Amino acid sequence: MKWSLRIGRLAGIDVFVHLTFPLLLAWIGLSYYLERRVLADAFGAIAFVILLFGIVVLHELGHALTARRFGIPTRDITLLPIGGVARLEKMPEEPGQEFLVAVAGPAVNVALAAVCAALLFGLGLPLIDESPDLITGNPLRSLLWVNIALAVFNMIPAFPMDGGRVLRALLAMRLDYVRATRIAATIGQSLAVAFGFIGLMGNPLLVFIALFVWMGAAGESQVVQVRHALGGVPVRAAMIVDFRRLAPDETLRDAAGHVLAGFQQDFPVVDRSRLVGLLTRDDLVRGMAAEGPNARVDAVMRTEFETISASDMLEPAYLRLQASGLRSMPVLTAGTVVGLLTLENLAEFLMLQTAAGRRQAVRRG
């Protein structure tokens, strides 16, 4: 994730912290210092927040290790001011597996809460503190209620919380995956409307949560619909076959002329039928500014980029193209460039597929 620093590795998974996280620590520390002008209050508050985010890491690790049992690796775990994110390579579409992966995070919090409750009971201390401040209260009691709160919050049946995935998994045991996702997303967005309405009565935090839930539900539904539309379709069905190639010794002026004359923005660079580079529109603009229009294409083209086979499937190709950060990917057959797969053309393909699906649904109805 951008603007993140690696702080360690846990169970073979890199852990990152977003650069805004230190700002959160500084703000909390300053807030507690200004109350009594005591440095110990500030350091205590910062230490508690760091401990809290350690619990968040364990929560995300619960998801990651459960997913690993089903052969799904985790790219990394990133700590953000609003919580943590474990980036799994994918979510399992087998409902039982998704249920276990989703529930694993809150299960970690329940287990930690049980440990804290047992320790408090063993020490003869009550589970409820008269002091409402989690930071200045008894640490064990604070950790108990923090874990309970995290488990309850994450089990709200709305994307992107774990509860939304649990709900989708339960629905998918009886319905197809796309319909289960659509129903779970609708329920989540209904909850978001309720949160937002209540928040407008005087709780801005609920308004923020409502926006977070609404966008998460919409995003999850869109992702699943895209994957469903692309599933089982080969790359050759959506690639551009009418495209221009550039030679390494052509100039940037030549490339700019092709951009202005047509719709193409990225160009495979071919030397004697062999793909040697990719010139993107951004490379062209930077090259024109730095080297001038007479510079050769091979002086500014990139030599490291993703390629795909025409016989590969569109769904993984789409994920690879998104991860690459580029808009285009050359399509090869037996080492020869036979097409271009672009985000723009994929969007057109999805639009047409969706329209065709709606027509078929109307006919069946």
Image (cartoon, rainbow, N blue to C red):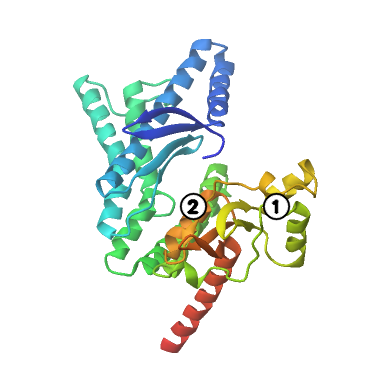
Q: Quickly name the residue at label 1.
A: 249
Residue 174 can be seen in this image: yes
Which sits in the foreground, 193 or 8? 8
Mark 1: amino acid: Asp
Residue 189 can be seen in this image: no
**Up/down of 289 relative to 178, above or below:** above
* Image coords of residue 185 (percent x, y): 44, 61
* Image coords of residue 85 (percent x, y): 43, 41
* Image coords of residue 346 (percent x, y): 55, 66
Element under label 1? Answer: loop
Q: How many marks?
A: 2
Of badges 1 and 2, the one in the foreground is 1
**Quadrant in which residue 186 is drawn:** bottom left
Mark 2: amino acid: Val
In this rendering, position of residue 118 left or right of residue 239: left
Pointers 1 and 2 in contact (CB under 8 A)?
no
Which sits in the foreground, 299 or 140? 299
Packing grade of label 1 (10 A; few <14, some 14-19, many >=20) is few
Q: Earlier in the sequence, mark 1 or mark 2?
A: 2
Q: Residue at x 33, y 43 (%)?
A: 63
CA distance separating discs 1 and 2: 52 Å
Q: Residue at x 27, y 25 (%)?
A: 126
In this rendering, position of residue 347 left or right of residue 59: right
Q: Quickly name the residue at label 2.
A: 213
Q: Residue furthest front?
A: 272
Element under label 2? Answer: helix
Q: Pick the quarter of the image with the C terminus.
A: bottom left
